Every structure is written in C-alpha cells, then in structure tokens.
Amino acid sequence: MQAARYLRDFIDAGTSRGSHIPVQNLIQARDKRGALSVAELLQILELPADRWQVRRVRNAEQVPIGGAELHRNQETPVVDRHLTGASYCGEAIYSGDDWINARPFVRHHLLKCDGKAEIMVDEVNYWPMLFPLKARFLLVPEHDLSGDDKGHLELVQKMGGVFHNWLRPQDLTALAKPPRGGHAAVINRVLKHQIMNWGLSDAVVALGSMRVYLNHAMDLAFDQVRGKGDPETDNFVVMAESLGSFVVLDAMDSKPAVADVMARTDYVYFLANQVALLELARIQGVPTVISPKGEGEYPDLVEATGPATVRPSPYAMLKRWGQQSHNLINHPRQIIAFSDPSDVLTYRVPPIDGVTVVNLYDRNTPRWLGLLAAFGRAHLGHLENKAVWNVLMR
C-alpha cells in the first residue's frame, strides 16, 4: 500500500500553483473564545514568517451570495433563504432576526508567499443554524430533568463576533426556577449533556429535513471556493471535523459544487468522524415494501420487487470518490482519519476499494487514572494537538 501523503507535501506543491483547503467548522464550540486565529494557523503549520503573509479576506472583498444581507459577524453568508416557517413541536425556530444570525457562513484566509498567492483556506461554518435548536429545545428543558448544562448554556448566550444569544426571555425565566427533577447523578448528567444533547443531536438533525439546508450551505460554500482560483491547475484538500465528514459526503451526491471540488480533491482528512455509525442510517439493498404472506400474529413476509429509495451511504460516496482518481494504481486517493480512543463520538473509517485509508489514533486530553477523559477535548481537540500536526506536517 502506498504511504500516506500529508499536508506538508500539499503545501510544498503550492509553490508552483494555487492550492485550496476547504475546512469545515473549525470553530464549532471548541472553546469559548471562538475561531482558530490566522496567527495560530500559521504557527501550527510552521510556515516561514519571513516569506509568508496571511490576511483575512472580508466581505469588502467578497460578494455575498444572492445579495443576502451581511451576517452580523461580517463573514460571507452562504444561505439567504429564510427558514422562518421551520418549527419544532409546533413552536417556531427562527424569527427574521434570528435567521440573520443563524445562517451558515464561510471565513476566508489567503496565504501568500513572497507576494504570490499560494494557499487559500476556506472555513465553512454551519453550526450557527444548529445552536438555536439545541439551546431552546434541548438545553432549556433539560433544566427540569438532568440539570443545567452550564458550559453549553454559557456558549449559546455568548455575544459578539460570530456568536449570538439564543436564549429568549421565557427561556431565562424557566432556567431561573428550581428544577423539578432534582438533577441526575453527576456522571449520568455529564454523559447526557455531552453525548446526547450536544453530540448526537447534530447527527439527528443532519439525517432529517434540515439536511436540505446543510447540503445547500455546503454547496454554496464550495462554489465560492472553486470560483476563486484556476480550475485547471489548482489543488484541493478537504479537512472535515466531526459531523462535517458526513455533511460533505451527503452533499456530494446531489450538489454540483461539492461534487466538482471533491472530484478534484485527492487528500481528505477527518478529525473525528461518524462515517461507520451513520452508515447504519443508509443501509443499502433494503426492499421498497414488505407485505404479509399467510396469516397469524407473526406471518412470514415476502419482499416486494425493487430496492428502497434511499440516499447513498457515506461508504458508497467515499467509494465513488475514490474511483474518480485519474491514476488509481500509482496515485490512489487517500483518507487520513484521526481519532482519540477516549472520544465517544468517533469511529474507524472502514477499508474502501481504490482508496488509501489510514486510521491514526491520538490523545487530545489526559485520562484521569485511566478511568475518564474530558469528552469535549477528546472529540474536538485534534487541531490543538501538536502531535497531530507533527504527523500532518512530517
């Protein structure tokens, strides 16, 4: 099997032609200060400070899609269709003002070497669309059940930059009352807050009706990425964190810009992924209908003709992507997947025909007496782990 190729190879190749790195959701609740800064990015990449210049590309130099009103944080919004009709248990999710702050956006960075454009890093952020859902319909009701998730409640009330206070007056009133349930056992409470309410809820949203907007946001963002360079010579690398791997693959099936960029991408990096888990939601070969045969309480079932109409699974999309390589024998496409063994929300990427799959295991946070590790740090700590970057840049 061909040895894995890492980001240093990609960056070195950028000295002769333009390169793009679409990166998904780097600032998704990793900490309470927001995004990985440009300075931190360059420090991590260990690029020579005397040769490289980096600047943040703001809206003054970008045209918002669809003439949309600018996002409050002055990044480039990628979805301008209002979701003011969306509801949860009969309750509206977004008002007009809410939707302005909930729209996904792209943050652009331009890296220059000796005055010549070399690498463009485009950070796709769809998490603002999910924050009001989790804040109002999971975190607030949890006050009366398992207890307050103080860390995430603080995050969804943060103001400034890309953040917005998603708690309404009635939410604050509910949180001020004594809890009815008397709180859960400490470890059970933490498990529910971190894994169910803040982790798996994203996957549930991505598999449901909101996936249409997640895919649309990803497509518009990738369209911005491909429109900024030379389509004949530019290279692409896609780096996805957590659920972003699934969202990219899901959008690749039906969204032209995502499909186009992925077709020109040979390197994919997953920083924690749920490909194996979400494959269960897209089981292939299931019959369209099963009808009863015979009588009785548990009659035999006979399959109807024709497979069920289901969207391609993550595995199927990765296999399709691998087969698009122009040189499968000498230059197979590759996936490098990082997972912290203590992360409860990551899985191994299975072997894929025609693709070099490398599963690597890092440790993003200490283990306390070998019994427990911080859930959030284990899951979202890859980009702050120097060992990960030492591997990527070796």
Image (cartoon, rainbow, N blue to C red):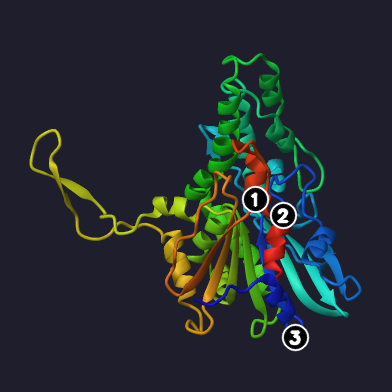
Q: Amino acid at mark 2?
A: Asn
Q: Determine the image quadrant of residue 66.
A: bottom right
Q: CA distance from mark 2 to mark 1?
A: 8 Å
Q: Residue at x 62, y 16 (%)?
A: 179
Q: Is residue 376 visible?
A: yes
Q: Is residue 58 visible?
A: no
The one of 157 and 3 positioned closer to us in this rendering: 3
**Residue 264 horizontal/vertical position (percent):** 58, 77
According to the picture, the residue beneath numbered tag 3 turns out to be 16
Q: Earlier in the sequence, mark 1 or mark 3?
A: 3
In contact (CB < 8 Å): disc 2 and disc 3 = no
The one of 179 and 231 positioned closer to us in this rendering: 179
The residue positioned farthest toward the front in the image shown: 369
For disc 1, the neighbor class at 10 Å (few under 14, some 14 to 19, many from 20) is many
According to the picture, the residue beneath numbered tag 1 turns out to be 363
Q: Earlier in the sequence, mark 2 or mark 3?
A: 3
In contact (CB < 8 Å): disc 2 and disc 1 = yes
Q: CA distance from mark 1 to mark 3?
A: 35 Å
Q: Amino acid at mark 3?
A: Ser
Mark on residue 385?
A: 2
Residue 88 drawn above or below residue 226: above
Q: Of circles 2 and 3, which is in front?
A: 2
Task: Name the quarter where the C terminus is drawn.
Answer: bottom right
Q: Earlier in the sequence, mark 2 or mark 1?
A: 1
Q: Residue at x 65, y 25 (%)?
A: 148
- As helix, strand or loop, the secondary structure at mark 3 comes to loop
The residue positioned farthest toward the left in the image shown: 294
Mark on residue 193?
A: none
Q: CA distance from mark 2 to mark 3?
A: 30 Å
Q: Amino acid at mark 1?
A: Arg
